[in-house]
Image (cartoon, rainbow, N blue to C red):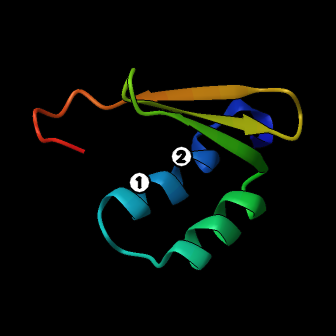
Amino acid sequence: MHGRDQSGRAPVRADQAGETTFPAFVRACWDAGIAWYDVDAAARTCTYYGSDGDSYTEVNRSSRSP
């Protein structure tokens, strides 16, 4: 995720806010350098992997059910 900055998180934040469609989210992730992501429903996490080998894990601490 380009230069370990916040640019890779922008598509995630937009998606969480309901401001984008899934295809737009995937394209924005790709443009930000996110090559793939992995969802662990049991742990309530999503890990985003950059094409440069970097990664970032979001933890969903919401009390709402998935």
Residue found 12% across the figure and 41% down from its top: 64
For the C terminus, which image quadrant?
top left
| Crowding at mark 2 (Cα within 10 Å: few <14, some 14-19, many 20+) | some
Q: In the image, is residue 38 above or below residue 56?
A: below
Image location of residue 5, percent across then percent down = 65, 36
Q: 59 left or right of 24? A: left
Q: 60 left or right of 39? A: left
Q: Which mark is residue 25?
A: none
Amino acid bearing label 1: Arg
Amino acid bearing label 2: Arg
Measure how far apart labels 1 and 2 are at the Cα level: 6 Å
Which quadrant would residue 16 be assigned to in this image? Answer: bottom left
For the residues labelled 1 and 2, say whether their Cβ atoms are less than 8 Å apart.
yes
Find the residue positioned furthest to the left. 63
Q: Which mark is residue 13?
A: 1
Residue found 74% across the figure and 46% down from its top: 36
Find the residue positioned furthest to the front. 42
Residue hosting label 2: 9
Seen from the viewer's position, the closer of residues 43 and 62 is: 43
For the N terminus, which image quadrant?
top right
Disc 1 element: helix
Residue found 67% across the figure and 58% down from its top: 29
Seen from the viewer's position, the closer of residues 22 and 56 is: 22
Residue found 69% across the figure and 27% down from its top: 55
Image location of residue 10, percent across then percent down = 51, 55
Disc 2 element: loop
Which quadrant would residue 4 be assigned to in this image? Answer: top right
Image location of residue 46, percent across then percent down = 50, 35
